[in-house]
Amino acid sequence: MKRKLNINIDHVATLRQARQGTYPDPIDTIEIIKKAKANGIVMHLREDRRHIQLNDLRRFKKKYKFHFNLEMAPTIDMINIANKIKPDVITLVPEKRMELTTEGGLNLKTNFDNLEKLVKKISKDIRIMFFIDPIKLQIDIALKLKAYGVEINTGRYSESTSYYATKELKRIKKAAAYSTSMNLYTAAGHGLNENNLSKLVKIKDIKEYNIGHSIISNSIFYGLYGSIKRIQDIINVDD
Ligand code: PXP
């Protein structure tokens, strides 16, 4: 089975922002990503603009028709940006200023009122996904919010040592099966790398992976094309 792989290019921009300069340019990765036959890209426009900048989104859209998933916090300012940029998909994620990276799934229960208002404002031609922890209730609420799909947070799985990783894997498997049975498109992401992916890819209900940090890091050693191919070799194992 061919699973989809979207490359998160945020950390190309992290390197550029380290010197507040013009290179490396995350948009320059697109040709390589297309050549490697990944399915699309992900960019997270954070409110503090620590890596991807608004102009990166504009430049990407001007030049490419490639599949684009825009990750963002659930705020009206971000929705207004998305409505102008028109990514194919938006993934709503929780965001905290002080965090090093996204720390957990978006709690759809506690944020329900805000989310219900916001999703009504999202342009109809943009598919909506929610980044959630592997919990049935979160999937039920995603359905109520008319989601196209969910991205299951694999952060806890990827950080866990074996006993907890196995437990977390079971939760992810159950959540992915439930999400698929409810006709939600099911993706997974956060903290995934060459070591922890092989167990996860056994979960057939996960149709798409969104991976950034490990692929961009490994491109130091293998080049971006090689780094993507190494991940594709793992996720495209035959069933
Ligand atoms: N999915 C979501 C919702 C994320 O927030 C991130 C990190 O920006 C990723 C996937 C990619 O995670 P990583 O960079 O650890 O592969």
Image (cartoon, rainbow, N blue to C red):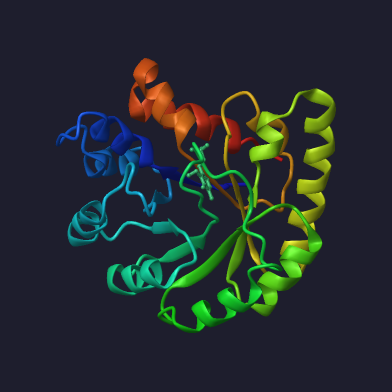
> Is the residue 93 above or below the residue 76 in the image?
above
Relative to 85, say whether 218 is above or below. above
- Please count the marks in the image: 0
Q: Give percent across and percent down for residue 143.
A: 68, 75
The residue at 63%/69% (across/down) is: 111
When the figure is inspected, residue 140 is found, relative to residue 94, above or below; the finding is: below
Quadrant where the C terminus lies? top right
Question: Where in the figure is residue 44, as x and y percent of width and height?
Answer: 40, 51
Q: Which residue is drawn at 45% across and 65% down?
A: 89
Rendering coords of residue 202 (x, y %)? 73, 39
Locate residue 51 relative to residue 212 in the image: left or right: left
Quarter of the image where one finds residue 34:
top left
In the displayed orientation, state which residue is furthest to the left: 22
The residue nearer to you, when weighing 74 against 43, is 74
**Left or right of residue 162, residue 150 in this image:** left
The residue sitting at 23% across, 51% down in the picture is 56
Q: Which residue lies furthest to the top in this view?
A: 221
Q: Which residue lies furthest to the front in this view?
A: 98
Q: Between 216 and 234, which is closer to the camera in this rendering? A: 216
Q: Which residue is drawn at 62% across and 61% down?
A: 150
* Of 147 and 55, the residue lying toward us: 55
The reply to whether residue 205 is in sight is yes
Q: Where is residue 59 in the image (x, y as percent from the top left)?
A: 19, 55
The answer to whether residue 201 is seen in the rendering is no
